[in-house]
Amino acid sequence: MSDVSALFSCSAFDAPCSRHDLQADGYARAVQSLSSIPPAGLLQLDGDGVVVRQSALPGLPDLRTRHVSEVFHGLAGITGTGWGRVVADCVSTPHHYVWRTAPESGDRLFAVECTCLGTGAPGTTHEQWPHWLLRLSPLSPRDGGLRAPHLLAQAAHQAGDAVMITCAGGLIEYVNPAFERNTGYRANEVLGRSPGMLKSGQHGPEFYAALWRTISKGEVFRAVFTNRRKDGELYFEEKTISPIRDVQQKISHFVATSRDVSERIRAQEQLEYLASMDMLTDLPNRRLFSDRLRQAMRRSARLERPLAVLFIDLDRFKVINDTLGHSVGDALLTEVASRLRGCVRAADTVARLGGDEFTVLLEEVGSRDAVAQVAGKILKVLARGVRVAEREFFVSASVGIAMHPDDGSSIDELLSRADISMYCAKAAGRNTFRFYEPGMDEHARSDLSAEIALHGALERQEFYLVYQPIVDARTGHVVAVEALMRWHSPGHGLIPPSRFIPILEDTGLIVPVSRWSLRVALSEVRRMQHARPDIRLSFNLSGRQLHDDDLVDDIAAALAETGVDPHTLELEITESTLMEDIPRTSEVLSRLDAMGISLAIDDFGTGYSSLAYLMRFSVRTLKIDRSFVAELDSSGDAITIVRAIMSLAQSMGLDIVAEGVETEHQFALLGDLGCHRLQGYLFGAPARPEDLSQLRCFACVE
């Protein structure tokens, strides 16, 4: 009823009529205060819903006040002072969207009578009437006065989050100013329309089907929406849609509250892009290459067409890089990447794994001869001189080749065997290629021997722990230590963790070994706390441990036995481990969080976690992967990545630790970026507890 300046209240007052004679003007003024549109009349009802009094609101001429009062009790009367228009029919329909207005000439007073109470409408755009009823109905004396509804209305109006109310059919009836700011639409442009006007086309039909399926059952729907503003710009909003039920418990409306999270989502998208691409060469990195290889292996199995993985390592590149500097080395790597792309088909993948190591994925290869031709072409193209900084360089490479399915059925197998083949090519004199052969698998047999030795290593007490300090760069003091496992085998010597940890994982031995190492670590940190009470322990958890039913009880028992405060302990897990089994991981980490134990994400930026899961798992610390820190000395892109991680962490209130800090330049850059908790060989190599006091950063612990 957009052209009639009229307003009425359906509040039921069951007090005596004489009392309302005294209070009518007060309620009328209260109603009038809720809107800038001058209302015209007030109906007062008794407890049975019968009109007991009609009165005009302040400001109307006395003549019109008398006309309103002449309408007899029991009927709903309403007056209009609008611009020559009045409701003509369809007054009694329960849905006011079909009301029509009929033109009428002259500035006259019109009266509409109806036999069913509640068929009038507020004197504002008709799509807003539910909002008005919500604001007006609490004004009855039984609700305790005018303050609560006024505050409720103001809260919605002034809320920082966007608020939108729709009817049960999905048409917009109310939006607040925050909605207008977020979308660019004014209220009068959206009222009576479907929220679908904001659709961006980024969500499929199944998304909206799930939405309606959820809210139609009376349940709350939460999701991040990609919508489109009035000016066409896409934006992201975290939205919660809640059903509203009437007195008969039927869903009458839906209220949606939303917050613009575009900046945060785009920061995450940038981070994910940077984490998937090599910034120097603009090639896919190891993560993206592994994804593409996984998909290609599925296609290969389905089509029964083999594929090949080529592992390429530049010969003597380290000499050039160390002698002439990173700028020359980077220019050389960029040119190599360009030449490799020119050697393969558009559907093939060239990636840089790091340093001077590249991989090539060739799909649907006809034969080994066809693969050999590509490998020969690569060697020939790379052998041509490369001019950098007014100097010409001649580059050669060693190439190892593994075929799927013959040489491996998993990503790790193919990459490992292509890598082994590459080392065989180097041993054969460099600047050549070799296909994988079973005889090259001595490395795998060595792992088997290590596995056999591992089974008795714990009982023989061959494991021990070392600790690497985590330093607050602002004070130079150690704030935590990370416990790291070492294995000294009588038959094999000191075995690097990169070899024996995966074997422990595969065999399940990681569970008892980690149970032992946690107790030892807590005991040794407890002794450190005699000198430094605030020092904390960082301890690594594996995916295998997260699936151990006794994990939480084991940790609780170890804390109780050693007397260490749970808040002292921080558990580290990798991004990939976090995402392996989300329901199980969520349950375990929630129990640990309830104990006061904090959670850190190790090697952040190399995995697949998202903002939603970081929040869901109550993560408190992100550890920037050492590969990003290592590039700070030579790559501006690495600085961009670290800055993006810092921005993301700060927006979520998370702590940051940078791993692998080895140079003063890295130290200074990280400080400029606001990262003050650092770990790396610059502050000290992992050491036994008795040797930690020799470190400069640990001097104050004694």
Image: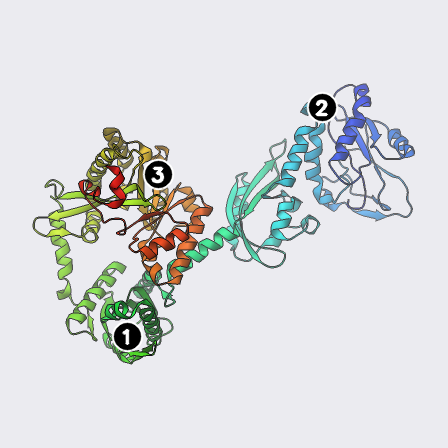
Q: Is residue 297 left or right of residue 85?
A: left
Q: Which residue is painted at 60% across and 33% down in the image? A: 249
Residue 702 position within the rendered picture, expressed as x and y whole percent measured from the top left: 23, 37
Q: Give whichever of 201, 511 is nearer the camera.
A: 511
Residue 366's label in the rendered image is 1
Please identify, in this view, whether the residue under mark 2 or under mark 3 is nearer the observer: 3
Q: Which residue is mark 2?
A: 141
Establish if 413 lies above or below 161: below
Task: Indicate which disc, 2 or 3, sits on the residue closer to the N terminus.
Answer: 2
Residue 229 position within the rendered picture, expressed as x and y whole percent measured from the top left: 60, 55
- Label 2 sits on a secondary structure element that is helix
Q: Is residue 674 left or right of residue 144?
A: left
Q: Which residue is mark 3?
A: 598
Establish if 235 lies above or below 702: below
Q: Which residue is painted at 33% across and 34% down in the image? A: 567
Residue 9 in sight from this viewpoint: no
Q: Identity of the amino acid at label 3?
A: Ser
Q: Quadrant of residue 75?
A: top right
Establish if 376 lies above or below 673: below
Label 2 neighbour load within 10 Å: few <14, some 14-19, many 20+? some
Q: CA distance from mark 1 to mark 3?
A: 53 Å
- Quadrant placement of the N terminus: top right
